[in-house]
Image (cartoon, rainbow, N blue to C red):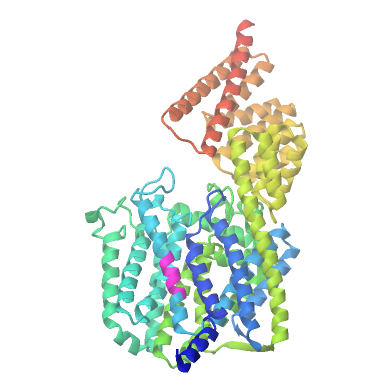
Amino acid sequence: MSKKQRGTKKESEAAPTPRLPLDRILIYSIAFTLFAIPLFIWPGLSEYGYGKTMVTLIAVSVLSILWGLSVWQKRGWSLRIPWIAFPFLGFVIASLLSLLTAINGRVVVQSLVLVVFFFQLALIIANVVREKRDATLLLSSVVASAFFASVYGLLQYLGAMPGAPDAAGATRIISTMGNKNFLGGFLSYLLLPSFVLLLRPRSRILRAVALGVIAFNFGTLMLVDQLAPMVGLIVAGIALIVGLILFRPVEPIRRNRAWLIGLLVLLVLTFLIEAPSGPLNSVVGLSQDGSTWVGRLWDRNSGRTRELDYWVGFEMLKGRPITGVGLGNYKLAFLQYKATFLATPRGSAYSDLRVARAAQAHNDFVQVAAELGGLGILAMLGAFTVLALSIWRRIRRNPDEADRLDLLLFTAGLIVFLVHALVSFPAHLPTSMLMIILLLGLIHAPAYGDVCVVTARVGKKVAMAIFGLVAAFAVIVSGFAISDLSANVLMSKGIEELQVGDSWKAVRILEKSIAYDFAPRQTYYMLATAQVKSGEIQGAIENFEKCFTRFVDENLYVVYGELMLSLDRLEEAREAIAFLLSTHPQREIELRARYTEATIAVRLRDYSGASRRLKDLVEDAPDYELALIALGNIYQAQQLSGLAIEYYERALTLIDGKLAKIETEMIGRTEFTAVEYGEYRQSIESLQGERAFVVEQLEELHEE
């Protein structure tokens, strides 16, 4: 071997193994997160969105730590702070001040952590995306995720995969979102920004793939048949045209005109074929009914229900004008302010609506005003103003026409989101927010300039101190997220045990779930229910009362009222039932409440009042056997045997009919979920108990 060869060999052995820089690892990690979260589902959790939210917290924690580690290799840290961060800080302050008037402070803290972490992801993207290829990579990840979610939804639509039970056509679609509406919103925000994937790549193969994927996702959007996202797309399309006229990104459009024309033609054909109102829909057999989305514009029921939500939100704002009812507390304050609103002259027009509880206001702007009051409104207006100004300046001052077109398309996606938020709650959905966070991050990323960005430069020691705080916070939040996930799984197992009848085991599991949960809500209600069945009455009372500041809905008030009645705590029972009836509850709950109200009158020896209430109840609901039994009891006590027998026999006929109906339904099915089985079992046990009592009373009356 020559000296030259030996030298070459030594150099080869000494050469370090190429390593992937932390900056690249961070970009790929963000791309994986954006791809995985929309598709993430975990059987055993209470809902799809909850799992996505908790996993997002963990993912952002990991990304934050990776971001900090990437600083370790540098002499200092240049932190880019977009202008939008300053009104966001105002939002955080308003949220903290809402603790002063919140029903449940833990819900405020939990909600605020979610908001901060999602914004932190936007801040990371706005700092690390320095090249167009990275922006394209992140956008491609979301588009690919949307494609697989769309494929899953289409298979459910066609019946090839299980979807929503007892549903057909579009209503069967839940995909990986848990609701076809959530899938439709996500796809609508993504549609116009995804055009970038047709403009940026040089490879024709990649462009052709993008063309097909965009068209397919648009087709799924047509199938889910949602009006608000389509209106949002129309508004965004108009805004995009105005932007093209103002900022004139002519060169990239001219260069890619063939691809853009091809995409527009494909989208038009997709609309004609797959839209419910499309003329070719019936030809290909995708139409499930003859309705059109235009014909459902502000449908009477859903539209008026949303109006009720808005007016209730306005009542909250009037009641707490400065700090609101507390971030995340709309759902806890809803029934209280619903009762207040229905008592007003305006509210009387909505008394026919039956809204048991409202987790969201179906308008994110109304909900911010209700939860954060005037301070929240100021923060929200400040955010809109700063965002609009930032986007305008960043587009105006960018000399690259292709960059200007990208920014216009990203902005169009934001506009669809904002329009949809007028009649829905996309800001409360993790997948939808992930899309908006991506767009905000890309709009403010260094790949598109440094306008409207404040750069804070700090030394390595200060950077490491900041990183240490962020890392510690991330680890703590991740720990709570993992604990909350465990709590949710345990809650589901506890509910399942309760449904199959093992109430003692359900109590133990649900108690463990509460111990793991940072802000338990529904678990308290399920635990109290299990405790009632297992005879732990005092514990049940305590946990039901905790629900008044944690899980407020109509069932809580009627069950609590019935429990207080059984313990002869009549005043507490009367107050709970009176409040419940003032909210105009759902019919089944209303019937139970009215029956309980009549029973309270019996306990107070107001027999004439009880008889009047029961007769009114029977007139409104002739098939409500409990009212018939109660009337039989009253007439039997008054020794009016003929009337007592009449009402008992009517009740017995109804009971036998309901038992026969349940038996027929169960014979016709081969599989049951734990919830379904529990409902059938509970109904049968209740009806059999009623039947035994009625038969016994009739035998006594006939023997007299």
Residue 1 sits in quarter: bottom left
Outermost residue toward the left in this view: 283
Q: Relative to 642, say whether 121 is above or below.
A: below
Outermost residue toward the front in this view: 1
- Residue for point 59% across, 40% down: 496
Q: Nearer the viewer, residue 620 or 698?
A: 698
> Magenta residues?
138-145
Question: Residue 253: percent from the left, percent from the top?
Answer: 32, 85
Outermost residue toward the top in this view: 703
Question: Residue 65: percent from the left, percent from the top?
Answer: 63, 73
Left/right placement of residue 160 relative to residue 112 reads left
Residue 531 sits in quarter: top right
Q: Relative to 466, say whether 40 is above or below.
A: above
Q: Nearer the viewer, residue 65 or 247?
A: 65
Inspect the magenta stretch and tell me whether residue 142 lies in it. Answer: yes
Residue 697 at least partly seen: yes
Left/right placement of residue 446 relative to residue 164 reads right
Majority secondary structure of magenta residues = helix
